[in-house]
């Protein structure tokens, strides 16, 4: 053996012994679903008795779910002490928890032979098997292997009504952890969208020490739902670290079940819009527009083949002269439109004139959009001579906090005027590119909230409208910010319904949109699918965290996405990532979360649309990053005071 290989061996053994000391317990990974597998190099049977003490106070996380949704039923199931449980969660002894609330369960953890566990006694129900008990009833706080091992049963001979012992997964700190200030181990139950870093940040723990506690590493930090992750804590967990169920989405679920009450009128209209009026509006508009545009058809056809069908104002005006469309006629049409779309108001042109001081430059926002004051409240008024029927049809169907709302229309002398909800802080473009913003720098948490808002808006049009829509033009100038810097998606003029495509993809000949934000499959082949928006959204997020525009190359001639890919491929992505993140944040962000976000962005920008996440996955991950960012914010304040 040469010196060289001896040296290598030495290093390797040093690393592995270091690893053994550091890796307190091996993570169970996916083995929990493989009941016949009792590989003792994983923690399938339980966490090894390797701690300083053979018994200790430990904590479990359980998510309330009827019938286990009260202090007494949860402490009964998990053999905890009810008064300690209510104390740990700061709730009264007779409290019940909303479904999906994270409940802190204090337990006495002790060594039973080889493994740490807490014995809970459980009466087998009809249809139970070891896996169902471990995974569904105990949510992963036990494993089928441990139940079988404990009760000497194999799958199949668990009889309803018999009482078994379910060993719950807990552990006591090792010498190493004790020396590092760890006093308790929390068995956290992983859900979809969790990352080791988001969980750690939430409990105020260094990600590295959580990884070590579970035998994971930065390179191999994949975790799975319904398994436990040990979180090493200095102090007992508190209910400020647990999570309440997410609030119900701002707009209710699919259009098939409209609530009967009159409270959700706008939703009801959306439903009507979706099933009947939508078609009616389209028919009415198509008929009218066919009649309107018959004369200009040949002209606009030329532009159609190269871009979106645009009726230029000249031809529109000339048409007006020839057909002599009267204001009365158009108003009749508008009334019929508003009749169908009950929430739409038809404005008299004079109203809009007085709202904008006759469209004076003072009220000009940008492009053909004006700010107006109607009955004391602000509105954005967009003047256009394009075919807005599709846009109105779509806007009529949607009602969501994160989508700019169309409140009314007006038609005058060949121009449509669309009256929109007004977003006081204007477009994201004005706030995000750091060289431009002077008044205020958006904080990390505000940026995450904005990204989450846009993701929720997109998820809504992808999944909750009928038919689903693709926005097709997501970019910073189409994201508007309200008074609280909450984001709303605007400009649905390019939005396309994915209806009647049969397959997931639609083909289009008209490539429209904004350079730099367009997905490769669209640029190259004209494929349209919701994954198009996912790509643009990836670019948008990249701009939000870097404060740079995608078109601008960063160093060595790399584009932003290339720079990101290079960083994530690096050995030390964290360090390099700091160079990419907006310098105006001055390092004031949780770097672990920034890395999670960077990975999310990278997945949105994948070349193959099928390997990009769907918008609802993105929402899930972002809401996780968002709430963890809030926790981080709170902890930061606590430390600084
Ligand atoms: C795992 O099981 C094998 C065989 O049963 C045994 O020889 C070995 O010592 C066990 N390892 C541990 C870490 O318990
Ligand atoms: C656990 O061990 C530590 C260190 O030996 C000791 O200080 C502590 O009191 C023990 N705790 C319990 C609950 O026995
Ligand atoms: C742990 O054991 C002690 C002593 O037996 C008991 O007083 C306490 O209630 C137990 N705690 C829990 C959470 O069960
Ligand atoms: C748990 O139950 C088993 C018997 O199934 C027993 O051997 C063990 O001592 C118990 N452990 C504790 C901590 O009570
Ligand atoms: C485990 O339980 C959860 C919650 O009840 C369930 O959604 C999931 O499908 C289960 N896992 C398997 C593999 O059955």
Image (tube, grey):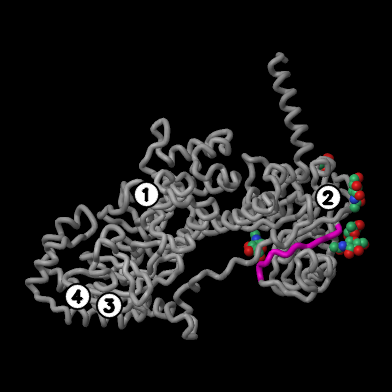
Instruction: Determine if the C-beta at disc 2 is less than 8 A from ligand 2.
Output: yes
What range is drawn magenta here? 99-108
Q: Which quadrant is home to the N terminus?
A: top right
Say if residue 629 shows up in the picture.
yes
Q: Label 1 to label 3, Cα distance in Å?
A: 35 Å
Q: Count neighbours of disc 1 (C-alpha within 10 A) and say few if under 14, some if 14 to 19, many if 20 or more.
A: many
Q: Count neighbours of disc 2 (C-alpha within 10 A) and say few if under 14, some if 14 to 19, many if 20 or more.
A: many
Instruction: Give the quarter of the image for residue 25.
Output: top right
Residue for badge 1: 517
The reply to whether callout 2 and callout 4 are in contact (CB within 8 Å) is no
**Closer-to-camera residue (96/302):** 96
Label 1 element class: loop
Q: Label 3 to label 2, Cα distance in Å?
A: 70 Å
Label 2 element class: loop
**Closer-to-camera residue (154/494):** 494
Ranked by sequence position, the earlier of labels 3 and 2 is: 2
Residue for badge 2: 172
- The relative height of residue 209 versus residue 281 in the rendered view (above or below) is above
- The relative height of residue 376 versus residue 362 in the rendered view (above or below) is below
Q: Label 1 to label 2, Cα distance in Å?
A: 50 Å
Ranked by sequence position, the earlier of labels 1 and 2 is: 2
Residue 347, label in figure? 3
Magenta stretch: dominant SS? Answer: strand
Q: Give the label, 4 or 3, closer to the camera.
A: 3
């Amino acid at each position: 053996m040469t010196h060289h290989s001896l040296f290598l061996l030495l290093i390797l053994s040093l690393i592995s012994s270091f690893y053994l000391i550091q890796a307190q317990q091996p993570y169970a990974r996916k083995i929990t679903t493989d009941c016949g597998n009792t590989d003792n190099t994983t923690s399938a049977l339980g966490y090894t008795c390797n701690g300083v003490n053979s018994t200790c106070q430990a904590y479990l996380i359980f998510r309330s779910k009827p019938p286990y949704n009260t202090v007494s039923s949860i402490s009964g199931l998990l053999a905890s002490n009810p008064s300690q449980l209510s104390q740990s969660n700061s709730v009264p002894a007779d409290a019940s928890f909303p479904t999906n609330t994270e409940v802190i369960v204090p337990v006495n953890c002790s060594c039973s032979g080889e493994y740490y566990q807490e014995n809970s006694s459980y009466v087998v129900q009809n249809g139970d098997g070891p896996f169902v008990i471990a995974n569904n009833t105990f949510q992963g706080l036990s494993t089928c292997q441990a139940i079988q091992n404990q009760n000497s049963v194999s799958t199949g001979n668990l009889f309803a009504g018999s009482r078994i012992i379910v060993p719950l997964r807990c552990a006591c700190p090792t010498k190493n952890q004790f020396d590092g200030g760890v006093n308790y181990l929390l068995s956290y139950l992983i859900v979809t969208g969790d990352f080791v870093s988001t969980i750690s940040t939430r409990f105020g723990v260094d990600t590295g020490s959580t990884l070590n506690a579970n035998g994971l590493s930065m390179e191999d930090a994949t975790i799975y739902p319904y398994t436990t992750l040990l979180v090493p804590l200095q102090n007992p967990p508190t209910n400020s670290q647990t999570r309440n169920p997410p609030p119900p989405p701002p707009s209710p679920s699919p259009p098939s079940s409209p609530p009967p009450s009159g409270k959700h009128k706008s939703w009801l209209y959306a439903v009507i819009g979706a099933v009947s009026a939508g078609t009616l509006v389209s028919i009415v508009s198509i008929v009218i527009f066919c009649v309107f545009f018959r004369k200009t058809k040949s002209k606009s056809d030329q532009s159609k083949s190269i871009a979106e069908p645009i009726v230029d104002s000249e031809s529109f005006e000339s048409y007006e002269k020839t057909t002599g469309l009267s204001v009365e006629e158009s108003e009749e049409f508008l009334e019929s439109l508003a009749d169908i779309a009950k929430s739409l108001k038809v404005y008299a042109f004079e109203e809009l004139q007085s709202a904008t001081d006759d469209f004076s430059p003072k009220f000009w926002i940008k492009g053909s959009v004006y700010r107006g004051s109607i009955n004391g409240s602000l509105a954005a008024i967009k003047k256009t001579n394009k075919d807005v029927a599709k846009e109105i049809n779509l806007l009529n169907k949607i009602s969501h906090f994160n989508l700019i709302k169309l409140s009314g229309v007006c038609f005058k002398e060949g121009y449509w005027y669309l009256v929109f909800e007004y977003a006081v802080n204007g477009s994201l473009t004005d706030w995000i590119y750091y060289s431009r913003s002077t008044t205020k720098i958006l904080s990390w948490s505000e940026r995450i909230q904005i990204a989450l808002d846009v993701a929720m808006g997109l998820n809504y049009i992808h999944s909750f409208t009928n038919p689903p829509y693709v926005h097709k033009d997501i970019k910073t100038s189409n994201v508007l910010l309200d008074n609280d810097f909450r984001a709303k998606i605007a400009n649905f003029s390019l939005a396309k319904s994915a209806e009647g495509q049969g397959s997931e993809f639609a083909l289009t000949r008209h490539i429209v949109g904004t350079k730099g934000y367009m997905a490769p499959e669209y640029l190259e082949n004209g494929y349209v699918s919701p994954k198009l928006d996912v790509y643009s959204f990836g670019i948008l997020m990249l701009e939000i965290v870097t404060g740079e525009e995608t078109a601008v190359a960063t160093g060595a001639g790399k584009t932003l996405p290339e720079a990101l890919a290079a960083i994530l491929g690096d050995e030390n992505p964290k360090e390099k990532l700091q160079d990419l993140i907006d310098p105006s944040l001055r390092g004031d962000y949780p770097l672990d979360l920034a890395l999670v976000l960077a990975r999310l962005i990278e997945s949105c920008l994948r070349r193959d649309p099928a390997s990009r996440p769907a918008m609802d996955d993105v929402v899930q991950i972002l809401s996780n990053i968002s709430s963890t960012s809030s926790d981080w914010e709170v902890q930061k304040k606590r430390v600084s005071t």
